[in-house]
Image (cartoon, rainbow, N blue to C red):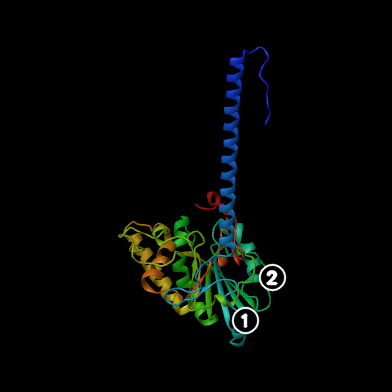
Amino acid sequence: MRHHTPPRALSSLDRALWMKSTARMTRMVIRKRIFLCILLCLSLTYLFYVKFQLFFPNVPTATSWGAPIVWEGAYDSEEENRFHQKQRTVVGLSVFAVNKYLESYLADFLASANIYFMPNLSCVFYILTDRPDDVPDIKLRPGVSKVILQVPKRSRWQDISMLRMRDLLELVLPRAVEEVDYLFCMDVDQIFTSNYGPEVLGELVAQLHSSYYRYNKVFFAYERNPRSAAYIPPEKGHYYYHAAVFGGTPSRLFNLTSSCLKGILRDKEHNMEAVWHDESHLNRYFALEELPLKILSPEYCWDNRLWLKYHKLVWAKKHYSKLRV
């Protein structure tokens, strides 16, 4: 801070007033700087606290009904691999790549899945698309095969999202029940970043939504309109699940997709649409019909907006204004 001396032309009284005013201004500046320093310290403290919480989240590793919540370090990956290799487990991975989503995301999704998805097990990749001839020809590792299944062209992205339950039920599951032991269903606008291994396998597997996993359920984006088939009463539900990832045995997924499709079609008959489309119906199924038997932490589907020490699958950069029709 610069210090000024009063002009010599001032009278002694004016000089005293000038000095008093200058001192008052100096104190104000000092107080302002102290306040800004305190504010900065508080902001940095909060920032580092949030970062620490995300790097080392204090979350349960099991639900109240005994289902494990899978976090890095909560399992023995070598033991999991040995068990499933001995069982000759085959895992299916279904992905929807329609309209412009195919050219924007499918190549990166498949290339990363080929490296990181069940790297020590045999796999079948089921690619559902309305443009079979445009599916990229990626050389797959030994033990991995791909099946391309054609789905109808749909004009609205909401229908593309919701009616994938029908496509899974009618196109994928009749094959999967004969070909794989477990099946995972995923959105295409994601990229695998590290081993996504057999620790995730279970009869019915749900994915915690990274935007809600630390929130109280009163803030969950459940469907609250009682007229919708996806409605969840306020007293029900435990977690908010992401429809970008879910899995299980083909028989369990038959039940899940059948129920969700039934609800979606019932809403269509009444000119309704659940607030988050198929995700709303998925959450209703897990809340009211069948509790998931294994839950994946946000490490298995991370949005990249905040810090997380480990991640297995992250969201790709979204271009909704160009992709959603």
Residue indicated by mark 1 = 81
Q: Quadrant of the N terminus?
A: top right
- Distance from disc 2 to disc 1, alpha carbons, whole Å, reads 24 Å
Residue flagged by tag 1: what amino acid is it?
Asn
* Secondary element at tag 2: loop
Residue indicated by mark 2 = 139
Residue flagged by tag 2: what amino acid is it?
Lys
Tell me the crowding category of disc 2: few under 14, some 14 to 19, or many 20 or more residues within 10 angstroms, Cα based: few
In front: label 2 or label 1: 1
The part of the image, by quadrant, that contains residue 200 is bottom right
| Front residue (pair 138, 81) | 81
Q: Residue at x 56, y 61 (%)?
A: 53
Count of marks, rendered view: 2
The answer to whether residue 136 is above or below residue 88 is above
Q: Mark 2 or mark 1: which comes first in sequence?
A: 1
Tell me the crowding category of disc 1: few under 14, some 14 to 19, or many 20 or more residues within 10 angstroms, Cα based: some
* Secondary element at tag 1: helix
The answer to whether residue 75 is above or below residue 129 is below
Residue 235, position as x, y percentages in the image? 33, 65
Residue 66, position as x, y percentages in the image? 45, 77
Residue 69, position as x, y percentages in the image? 51, 72
| Front residue (pair 315, 114) | 315
Residue 6, position as x, y percentages in the image? 66, 19
